Image: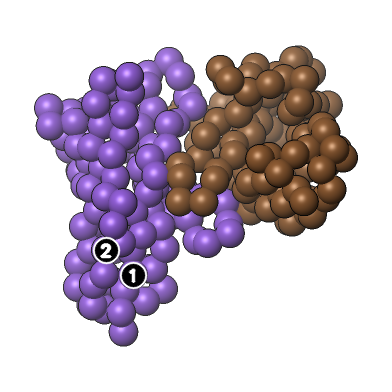
């Protein structure tokens, strides 16, 4: 099946710094990528949807200036958490969708654990 | 508002038994419903998709039912194995929107 990778798998940073997380589709071209956040024992919450070459669409309540998303190519999307604070500590998961599939199956990355001190 | 309910308590069963997980939804008319498996510290892995016009779907030891009248989906694992231990997420998806909404998931623990 299709493979999606994320880098880094975990990161610890100081409060106020910015962190970039990469999401790559390894063996297919992803027309659309999604970014989710998951707190412990909670469901995955969609943060934003990004299409290659266009601006991301953010879900209600997600600050677009804080969570910068760039989908520069059909195989790479990045999420930058700017001026991170402890409350941003969470598990960030991306998923990618290949165009042309009837039911639009999403392939998920392994996730990135962010800890802000 | 849309609501997805999955049993928050862990389901403990003995190896070899059938595990049945429940997903109920309200204020929702999904065109299809997906089930995912999530292991600790990992992203979800797609298991099965069932459409609104399908009553049942099978894949190896997995079976999913979808009752749009009851607004419920059941997920069964037959002949369960300790390796099946994980959290299982239900994700209904509305027609026209290809983005699933995830439930919190139910933790399954299969004891040897």
Quadrant of the rendered image containing residue B14:
bottom left
Snapshot colouring: by chain
Tell me the distance, in whole angstroms, between the alpha carbons under discs 2 and 1: 6 Å
Which colour denotes chain A? brown
Q: How crowded is mark 2: few (under 14 residues within 10 Å), some or many (20 or more)?
A: some
| Residue A53: x %, y % from top left | 79, 18
Q: Where is residue B16 in the image (x, y as percent from the top left)?
A: 23, 77
Which residue does the numbered mark 1 point to in the structure image? Answer: B109
Q: Can residue B63 be seen in this view?
A: no
Outermost residue, right side: A17
Element under disc 2: strand
Which of the 4 image quarters holds residue B60?
A: bottom left
**A81 or B24: nearer the viewer:** A81
Image position of A70 (left or right of B79): right
Give the residue displayed 19% in from the left and 73% down from the top.
B17
Q: Which residue is drawn at 49% across and 27% down?
A: B99
A24 w.r.t. B26: above or below: below
Residue A1 as seen in the image, left or right of residue B84: right
Q: Could you tell me if residue A82 is visible in this image?
A: yes
Q: In the rendered view, tell whether residue A32 sits above or below residue B55.
A: above
Residue topped by disc 2: B11
Task: Work out whether disc 2 and disc 1 sit on a shared chain.
Answer: yes
Identify the chain of the residue marked 2, using the numbered disc in the image.
B
Query: Where residue B75 sits in the image (x, y, percent)?
Result: 25, 51
């Amino acid at each position: 099946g299709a493979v999606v990778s994320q880098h880094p798998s975990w990161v610890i940073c100081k409060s106020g710094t910015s962190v970039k997380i990469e999401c790559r589709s390894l063996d297919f071209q992803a027309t659309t990528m999604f970014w989710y956040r998951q707190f412990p024992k909670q469901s995955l919450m969609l943060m934003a949807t990004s299409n290659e070459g266009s601006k991301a669409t953010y879900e209600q309540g997600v600050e677009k200036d804080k969570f910068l998303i760039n989908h520069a190519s059909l195989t790479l999307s990045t999420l930058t958490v700017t001026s991170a604070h402890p409350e941003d500590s969470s598990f960030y998961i991306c998923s990618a969708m290949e165009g042309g599939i009837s039911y639009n199956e999403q392939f998920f990355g392994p996730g990135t654990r962010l800890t802000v001190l | 508002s849309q609501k997805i309910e999955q049993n928050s308590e862990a389901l403990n069963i003995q190896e070899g038994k059938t595990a049945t997980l429940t997903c109920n939804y309200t204020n929702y008319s999904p065109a299809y419903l997906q089930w995912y498996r999530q292991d600790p510290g990992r992203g979800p892995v797609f298991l099965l998709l069932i459409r609104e016009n399908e009553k049942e779907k099978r894949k190896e030891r997995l079976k999913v039912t979808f009752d749009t009248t009851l607004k419920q989906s059941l997920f069964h694992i037959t002949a369960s194995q300790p390796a099946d231990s994980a959290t299982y997420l239900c994700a209904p998806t509305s027609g026209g929107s290809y983005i699933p909404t995830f439930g919190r998931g139910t933790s399954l623990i299969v004891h040897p």
